[in-house]
Image: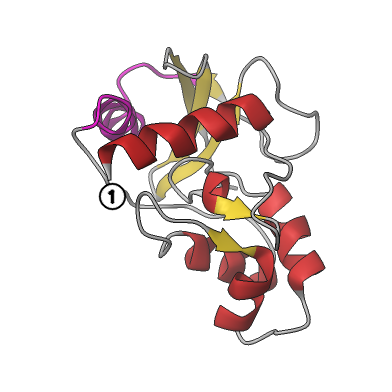
Amino acid sequence: MKRYVHKTMQSPVGRLKLIGSGAGLAAILWDADERKGRVRIDPGEEHQTHPVLRKAETQLNEYFTGKRKTFSLKLDLIGTAFQKKVWRALLKIPFGETRTYAEIARTIGHPNAARAVGAANGKNPISVIAPCHRLVGSTGALRGFAGGLETKANLLRMEADRH
């Protein structure tokens, strides 16, 4: 069985809990607003100096301060094959841009699966890294986000200002 470790970090959008293993970053949880059971992973012991978590924290801090637009982290994604396909598609949405759920569905070869993309997006364990905040409804309206719609709007504004 894989062993996970975690650490928390402060960010402009609140406290984040980073969870990883030797294989890579497995999750970023929204400490204050995290819906129980959204990401089913045992965070394991706290480990402030784990190299995967330290690298993730460094890159997230660079992102929040405008010094980074893309991430280069090993990922340890836990989910179904469909979910992983959606999350990998999220990784390809450029900084400062948005996509609709339907566009992602078409991108992954399931053009009628916009709702399933939404469900997979709701289980995205690596928010910000796999930028689910860049997904919007077909009208451009903001839809659900694990960190809250206000945080989603703030992230999109921040990216637009630096794009």
> What residue would you read off at disc 1?
70
Q: Main secondary structure of the magenta part?
A: helix
10 Å crowding of disc 1: few (<14), some (14-19), many (20+): some
Image location of residue 6, percent across then percent down: 49, 25
Decide: is 147 above or below 138. Answer: above
Q: Secondary structure at mark 1?
A: loop
Image location of residue 1, percent across then percent down: 60, 48
Q: Which residues are magenta?
A: 46-66
Q: Is residue 62 magenta?
A: yes
State the image quarter where residue 58 is shown.
top left
Closest to the observer, 111 or 36: 111
x 37%, y 41%: residue: 160
The extreme left residue here reads: 67
Image location of residue 108, percent across then percent down: 58, 80
Q: Is residue 147 visible?
A: no
Q: How many marks?
A: 1
Q: Is residue 71 magenta?
A: no
x 60%, y 67%: residue: 86
Give left or right: position of 130 versus 58. Answer: right
Which color scheme did the rendering employ for the protein?
A: secondary structure
The extreme front residue here reads: 139
Give left or right: position of 119 versus 41. Answer: right
Q: Is residue 34 visible?
A: yes
x 62%, y 64%: residue: 100
Decide: is 113 above or below 29. Answer: below
